[in-house]
Image (cartoon, rainbow, N blue to C red):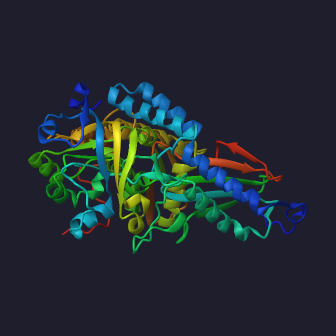
Amino acid sequence: MVSTMIEQAREVQLATPLDEKTVRALGLGDRVYLTGQFFTGRSRFHQHAIDEANPPPIDYAQINVLMHVGPVLKRDGNRWVPVSLDQTSSIRFSKWEPETIRRLGLRAIIGKTTMDEATACVMRECGCVHLTRVGTPGNLLARCVTRVVDVFNLEEDGMTEATWVFEAENLGPFIVDIDARGNNLFRDVRRATELKMKLLYQRFGIPADFTYAGEVSD
Amino acid sequence: MSAVVTCSSDATANRDVLTQQQVLHALIAAMERAATTVPQDIRASLQACAESEPSETAQLHLLTSLRNFDLSASGEGLICTDTGWPYYYVVIGNSVDLAGGLSHLNDLAAEAVRRCTNKARLRSTMVHPLSRTPIDGNVGFGFPHVTVRHDEQLRGMRIIAVPKGGGGEVFGTFCRTMLSADGMTGVYKFLLDSFRDSTYAGKTCPPNVIGIGIGGTPDVCMMLAKQAAVLRLVGDRHPDPEVAAMELELLDAFNEMGVGPMGCGGVTAAMDVHVEIAATHPAATCVAFNAQCHIGRRAVVRLTPEGEQIHEENPKWFQR
């Protein structure tokens, strides 16, 4: 068994926008529920916001939670109705995220997996956390969305890559996997896995310094 | 297998002709079911995993997924938002024909995917690889991808729909052609490293079903790994005892890494391991690894010669 701090998990209800003090009080493994507004973004959002220096016109001081997700919604007359909301892998946005957190003043990023060390450093410096999804919760989370507030770049980028602004009630739980104090849940698991790997290499007769035949070394 | 049959009475007489409507509706039914209803073997396996996980967090991951599946099965939402790349695997009985010719199968698959996308059963996910602009209805540029196999015994058609999500596919696909000097040591190193790297931080949404190809050329090897991951039931063992033993040995090893559900730590990160083999060249061994995420999306619809749809669980894909 991998031992992490997660077993002392607390359930935390938070209202958005999040302030720095609240975010810095969050600990690894806390189970967070959010009420209020948040926005969505994937590759296209980050390209607009950072590469083109043209983020969608959202009041980021008031809406300071970014969710990595390409939601499914359906049309009901003039209304958009959320169908499914499973978060995508955050690690693939790492190259943009330190700058995004700084420029937009984000306090929480909800996604899947983790983010790189550079992003974790900026989170610690600015007061921001990464929250990871629990299982595959997309239908349960779609139920928590009470209003589709706005959408940007829908025509150009399509439903999946557009930036949506949603309002939700008790959206969660999400697990704090990178807190604002330098802790990282998945890094802890990885360290434990590396110890197990050594034993497995031994069991399968794989030398620690194994290199594939034909690989050129200089 | 030893002789070429020069004349078969069955192959030319008494053809069963399915209409294009019958096949289209079966293709739609299979894809809709795959997007909304988790296969029985996957559900049972996740339930068993949840019961054996000592950590509350690991249990929470699995029990949340199971609750989520209940909603989509009852018509609310999807098993997972990322419906990914749409695949069809179609087994065609020797005596069956499609009105207008079997060449229309790809067009019907495309129409089925377009309709599923318009009904929000599939997310509008596919984009052009260069411009990155959305591809209307997830149709075009090679997708939906349709693989056909023929079966002498089958009456009618068996249609298997697999929407393959990005987590398993993007982060859980590896292939290496190694020289035979590396032997099985190289094969095991490649597989252990692949599992560790793919499941890190829950990238492939573990617990996974892992498909492995050994032998063949890289394209054949990767095809075997993909099909092993998505077209065999959890608990199914390869008929060759040597291969079956390898499956179980790897299953134990993968789970001993402690990666756990969604990479958060725990005792189960793989529900099963399926290995398929192909003939190789004396100089080399190709090894391929493909991960199916824990939702294990697949649905099987058998279309009888009369055009009736029957839901089945077992794809019965491999002929060895």
Farthest residue in the bottom direction?
Answer: B130
Q: Nearer the viewer, residue B65 or B94?
A: B65
Left or right, A161 with respect to B24, comes to: left
Picture coordinates of residue B181, whole percent (x, y): 37, 61
Q: Is residue B17 visible?
A: yes
For the N terminus of chain B, the image quarter is bottom right
Picture coordinates of residue B259, whole percent (x, y): 33, 39
Q: Nearer the viewer, residue A168 or B189?
A: A168
Left or right, B41 with respect to A168, comes to: right
Q: Nearer the viewer, residue B259 or A13?
A: A13
**Residue B235 in which image quadrant:** top right
Farthest residue in the left direction?
Answer: A125
Residue at the image position 87 percent from the left and 60 percent from the top: B10
Picture coordinates of residue B138, whole percent (x, y): 52, 64
Left or right, B291 with respect to A35, comes to: right
Q: Is residue B298 visible?
A: no
Against B103, residue A16 (above or below) is above
Left or right, A3 with respect to A150, comes to: left
**Residue B102 in which image quadrant:** bottom right
